[in-house]
């Protein structure tokens, strides 16, 4: 509680809640393959080709991995087949469709 004539100065949020930068290292290709395997509920041997494209496009940046996977799903480059009950992708299409513009788009979403 304060009076208007006392000139209230709110406390600096950083002094109340000190923040610490937490470095996050990049994912290795095996880490990404485990993530892709878990998301698709497939064996890591089955997701290796997709993982290689994801890694090539993101260089293991965790935020980019998430955005890239969302992007290829939205662009229907990663689809779920009702007939096989599995996720499907075509590496050639992924490479052809996910170009520098996709990388720039991912980078723009992070900013």
Image (cartoon, rainbow, N blue to C red):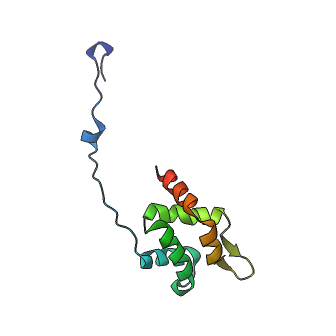
Where residue 11 sits: x, y (%)? 27, 32
> Which corner quadrant holds the N terminus?
top left
98 versus 83 height, above or below: above
Left or right: 80 as drawn, with respect to 68: right
Judge whether residue 38 can be spotted in this image.
Answer: no
70 versus 81 height, above or below: above
109 versus 51 height, above or below: above
- The total of numbered circles placed on residues is 0
- Residue sitting at x 63%, y 70%: 96
Left or right: 9 as drawn, with respect to 82: left
41 versus 77 height, above or below: below
Where residue 37 sits: x, y (%)? 53, 78
Residue furthest bottom in the image:
45
Left or right: 20 as drawn, with respect to 107: left
- Residue sitting at x 52%, y 71%: 54
Where residue 56 sits: x, y (%)? 49, 71
Residue furthest top in the image:
5
Left or right: 77 as drawn, with respect to 83: left
Nearest to the observer: residue 57 or residue 69: 57
Residue furthest right in the image:
83
Where residue 17 sits: x, y (%)? 28, 44
- Residue sitting at x 38%, y 68%: 26
């Amino acid at each position: 509680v304060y009076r208007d004539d006392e000139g209230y100065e709110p406390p600096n949020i950083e002094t109340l809640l000190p923040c610490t930068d937490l470095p996050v290292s990049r994912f290795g290709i095996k880490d990404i393959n485990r993530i892709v395997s878990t998301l698709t509920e497939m064996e890591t041997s089955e997701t290796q080709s997709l993982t290689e494209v994801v890694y090539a496009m993101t260089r293991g940046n965790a935020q980019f991995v998430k955005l890239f996977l969302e992007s290829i799903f939205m662009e229907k480059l990663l689809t779920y087949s009702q007939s096989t009950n599995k996720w499907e992708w075509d590496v050639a299409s992924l490479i052809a469709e996910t170009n520098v513009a996709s990388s720039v788009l991912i980078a723009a979403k992070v900013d």
